[in-house]
Amino acid sequence: MTALIIHGHFYQPPRENPWTGEIDPEPSAAPYHDWNERIHAECYAPNLTNYPQISFNFGPTLLSWLASKHPDTYQKILDADKASAAVRGGHGNAIAQAYGHAILPLCSERDLRTQIRWGLGDFRYRFGRDAESLWLPETACNDRVMSALVDENA
């Protein structure tokens, strides 16, 4: 049997103003206040019916923003993983992501381990289970990264 796997990689960098904790207006995202809101309206929310059917990862910074600004969408993403796990023998569709979307082969050893550990920890906190894999930012990889992933059970 031939299988087709579609993976959705969902990530937005933190856009919050460090002094206010809020996202300043981004005119290029009009008619929305900012790009997070625009992408939520055009992508994250419309894809809610697809998450139970596709492999996906959400960056921790994006999930934090969704939990705060769109808790219904956030909860439906978590529910989609639970629903997929229920029909796939406990294997949910969600996978982890390196925490800050750093290009892992360029990281120092300490930063590499931090990105992996924080990404796995955030996943466990949000999805209530251990991740079975980890999305590599920009799909960048080398032997050192692979060894670290094996060491960290990612």
Image (cartoon, helix red, strand yellow):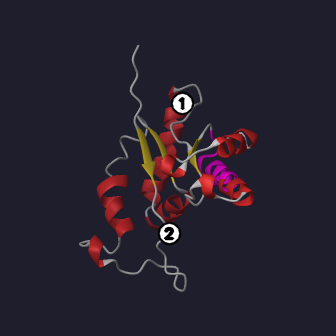
Residue 14 is tagged as 2
Mark toward the viewer: 2 or 1: 2
Give the mark nearest the N terminus, 2 or 1: 2
Rate crowding at label 1 as few (under 14), some (14 to 19) or many (20 or more) other CA atoms within 10 Å: few
Q: Which residues are magenta?
A: 116-131
Instruction: Give the percent coordinates (x, y) of residue 27.
Output: 28, 78
Please, is residue 50 above or below residue 114 in the view? above
Residue sitting at the far bottom: 19
- Residue 126 forms part of the magenta stretch: yes
Instruction: Give the percent coordinates (x, y) of residue 21.
Output: 52, 79
The reply to whether the C-beta atoms of the residues labelled 2 and 1 are less than 8 Å apart is: no
Q: Residue at left 71%, top 45%?
A: 148
SS class, disc 2: loop
Q: How many numbered marks have been drawn onto this rendered protein structure?
A: 2
Residue 9 appears left or right of 144: left
The residue carrying mark 1 is 86
Instruction: Give the percent coordinates (x, y) of residue 100.
Output: 58, 61
